[in-house]
Image (tube, grey):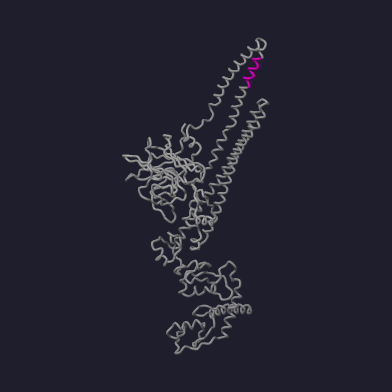
Amino acid sequence: MRRRRSGWILADMDSASSLLCEEQFLCSICLHDFTDPVSTPCGHNYCKNCITEYWDNSNVTQCPLCKKRFRRRPQLQVNTEFRDMVKHISSMRVKGGEEDLAKPGEVPCDVCDGPKRKAHKTCLVCLTSYCQTDLEPHQRVASLKKHKLIDPVSNLKDRVCQKHDKLLELFCCTDQVCICFMCLKDDHVTHETAPLERAFREKKAWLENVTSEMKEMENTKSGHVKEAKHSAQQNKEESERELADIVEVLGALVSSLLKRQDELIKLIQKKHKEVEKQAESHIAQLEEEVVELRRKRSKLTQYLQTEDHLHFLQSCPSLQHHALNEDLFDPLSLSAPPFIHCLSKMSLQIYVGMVKKYVALMERTLGNEMGVLIHELKLSDDCDAAEQADAAELLRDDFIQEDWFLRDDLYEEEWKPPQDKLMMIQQYDWMDVSFNGYIAHPKLMVCEGGKKLMLRTHERPFSPLFERVFLNQPYVLATEGFSSGRFYYEVCVSGSKAWMLGVVKESVSMLMGFPPKDEEGAWTLSAKYTESEEQYFTCNDFPLLHVRQRPQRVGVFVDYENEEVAFYDVDARTLMYSFRECTFNENPSVLKALLYSVAGFSLSNRPKLYPIFGIFPVGCDYDNTLVITPVGIAT
């Protein structure tokens, strides 16, 4: 027991002595290991350079610790034995801390002279990274305790202003860059700024909301994929049933018609395969969008996990980039897949009904021919050949006339073609659009599920840092844009005294004035009603001729491929105005193409066209509304 106790005592003494040695072998001026240690007459030890510089910068020659003054500056000699002892203790300490040596990819200590140990903290005041041993003065000295310590980082140069050599402590919301206090007085004196921590919290909260929306969009698109697969499977089963019914109906025909059966079946199979191919293509597109959303959400999640304010603000995507606000999130993409409506139409057994009707017609025709033949056989014994021919021709005419009446009866329930161009557009090109309240002018209010637009009496507050809204005019865009094909929508304008409708490119400026110009990427039609007159303007501020009647509903039709934008008076079924040879395509700038390439987004020269809407107060009258209405097809 005595031996064990003595061993414990020796161990405690060793640990205490090691701690004592570490403190004794630190220079009290630089707080680091002694370099060329010298001793003053009062018995204190210092680095030779440290005590020399201390006396050079002081009017009095005295000891920094005990304040003992000397008449003359002592002649200092390096204590070689003490220096060797310091080196020996330092080497032993390095050997004992080999486990703490910085590995590749880790931040090394900036103070260690020999092998660099792993940094434990980085001081933003000293702009130096310290290991656990060299960090001890910051935990002990009162003046150093006030320094701000963070997790070790290696990019200390990026945290200092290159112009003023000051720490970056502010974030310029106008230029989206980190600045120091000197920059605030020079180049950013009129800009809106915020502390790094507040800007970090705001942008992190925004990214959390974006991630949540992307997750919701991902779930919605996954549901669309399941719905599309289910609809495609139902269509396939319905197709198989239709083909079985057709085979059964055609099996009752005469053998001479069987050779036409294969041709008819192949034609119908081709129709169904085209629909199935469209379904598979749409499913593949939805699955690719889901994968892309997951990738982007994962990337944003990585940004959300960092606690480094500066690194987060400099490396995460800017709020002003269209790559996050427009290309990454498209609210109308949550709508139901358009081809599902086509699949539902295919389930009405259209082909079965058509085959049954024409088989019935052929059966009646063949029956008439058989009746003529039977009648000729009956007359062959009672009259001559001439009379037989006349009677057969008369009988054939009667049967043919009856057959045409049967044809009219068969065609009564068949589809009727559109009566005019507007009806055809309404039937085939109608798209469901909604107002996008996120980019609406502060004077506008969107309600009733994105279908109604109203004027506010007072502007709502908004954050210029996190919102992208129209500022000069009360405009709002639709939630979804189109970069191909044709689309059509109708708006009820009877509740507005001053309105604007049309389409704009996705790159349109948020500072667009009135009326918009086609050079700005806008094709619009505007109207203003006063007690004395009615005025209609296009995007080039050109007054149109007076229309026959004030439109209650206006239809907007866009043909992307033919570069056409047309406006219709739905009730009068007349064309109000149309733009031809519109320049929808554009060549992106080299800088924009480079930024999109770095961000990992594809850039096309076919920008999206977004429906745009606007309502304006007339005097003090704010009772103006626009309503997106379902398309009412005339019969």
Q: Position of residue 13 (x, y in %)?
A: 58, 79
Residue drawn at the location 56% of the way across and 51% of the way down? 292
Q: Is residue 525 found inside the magenta-colored segment of the image?
A: no
Q: Position of residue 449 (x, y in %)?
A: 45, 44
Note whether 553 is above or below 457 in the view shown.
Answer: above
Q: Is residue 368 found inside the magenta-colored segment of the image?
A: yes
Residue drawn at the location 64% of the way across and 19% of the way down? 370
In the drawing, does residue 254 fall left or right of residue 107?
right
Quadrant in the rendering for residue 533: top left
Q: Nearer the viewer, residue 327 or 200?
A: 327
Note whether 577 is above or below 312 in the view shown.
Answer: above
Give, as a single range, the part of the protein colored magenta: 366-376
Note whether 83 is above or below 231 in the view shown.
Answer: below
Q: Position of residue 175 (x, y in %)?
A: 44, 60
Quadrant in the rendering for residue 277: top right
In the drawing, does residue 222 fall left or right of residue 70?
right
Q: For the stretch drawn in magenta, what is the main secondary structure?
A: helix
* Residue reaching furthest to the top: 382
Classify the position of the N terminus by image quarter.
bottom right
Quadrant in the rendering for residue 272: top right
